[in-house]
Amino acid sequence: MPETEPISWRSIVYGTPVTAADGIRIGAVREVLGSDAEDIFHGLRVALTGRRADVMVSADDIESMSLVEVRTVLTRSQVDRLPAYDETATFHLASVGWLRKHLGWQKDAKSDEEPG
């Protein structure tokens, strides 16, 4: 598969560069927000270049995704105006598990069992 071929949200690799609509590289994928079980993609947590705080770019604001780049429909100035990503403020605690049902994040049920 060519590196520029469109990919599913489930195939996004952390660290993939994120580019604004005006062609400026704004940062890198820090986290994918979605539910594998329900096949719902909410968006990306993006670590912005030159800024301490991350932001969330919603799924509606993603234009394309490939192995080499995620492109958003937002310009750099629009991204700069996004609020800092704050997990507890953005997603209330009751929904965190629902938003993040990736296999690697699920607790192994057998590890909770008593030896016996």
Image: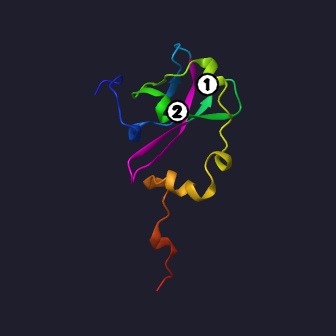
Q: Is residue 107 left or right of residue 64?
A: right
* Viewer-nearest residue: 34 or 11: 34
Query: Which residue is the site of mark 1?
Result: 79
Q: Residue at x 59, y 59 (%)?
A: 94
Tell whether 30 sits left or right of 5. Answer: right
Return the residue found at the far top. 22
Is residue 3 one of those drawn in magenta?
Answer: no
Residue 14 x, y percent position in the rendering: 50, 37
Residue at 69% across, 23% down: 50
Query: Does dot 1 land on a helix, a strand or a loop?
Result: helix
Please, what is the three-letter code of the amino acid marked with disc 2? Gly
Q: Is residue 101 left or right of residue 55?
A: left
> Which residue shows up at 47% across the image and 32% down it?
60
Observer-nearest of 88 and 13: 88
**For the magenta stretch, what is the residue range?**
25-44
Provide residue 81's location: percent of width, then percent of height: 67, 25
Q: Spot the residue most to the bottom.
A: 116
Q: In this rendering, would 16 be left or right of 90?
A: left
